[in-house]
Image (spheres, rainbow, N blue to C red):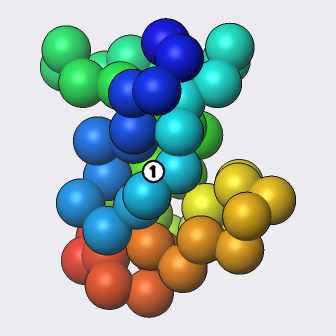
Amino acid sequence: MSTQTCACPACTCKLGAHAIVRHGKHYCCQACADHHAHGEPCASTEGCKCAKGAHG
């Protein structure tokens, strides 16, 4: 999954070795896969702020 990006709408993170697959889409972390249902931040160390625009 070299240069594929996370399926979370506002996330720009690249998928790593531990990507989560949900409904045929690939997410960089569990929080993104759950659409930030409880406001969990993205697990990225790149400072991604995709959770701020998510509606759980």
Residue shown at 44% from the left, 87% from the top: 52
Give the camera-side residue of 1 and 8: 1
* Residue 27 visible in the picture: yes
Report which quarter residue 29 is drawn in: top right
Q: Is residue 8 left or right of residue 40?
A: left
Question: What percent of the width, then of the height, locates residue 46?
Answer: 73, 64
Residue shown at 31% from the left, 68% from the top: 10
- Secondary structure at numbered mark 1: helix
Q: Residues within 10 Å of mark 1 (few under 14, many from 20)?
A: many
Q: Is residue 23 left or right of residue 45?
A: left
Q: Is residue 30 left or right of residue 36?
A: right
* Residue 37 visible in the picture: no
Q: In this rendering, is residue 15 above or below 56?
A: above
Residue shown at 25% from the left, 77% from the top: 55
Q: In this rendering, is residue 13 above or below 52?
A: above
Residue projecting furthest to the right: 45
Residue projecting furthest to the front: 3
Report which quarter residue 12 is drawn in: bottom left
Residue projecting furthest to the bottom: 52
Report which quarter residue 50 is drawn in: bottom left
Give the labeled residue for mark 1: 32
Residue shown at 59% from the left, 71% from the top: 48
Question: What percent of the width, then of the height, locates residue 14?
Answer: 53, 39
Please state which amino acid type lies under the numbered disc 1.
Cys
Figure label count? 1
Question: What percent of the width, then of the height, locates residue 18?
Answer: 67, 18
Q: Quadrant of the C terminus?
A: bottom left
Question: What percent of the width, then of the height, locates residue 39?
Answer: 52, 76
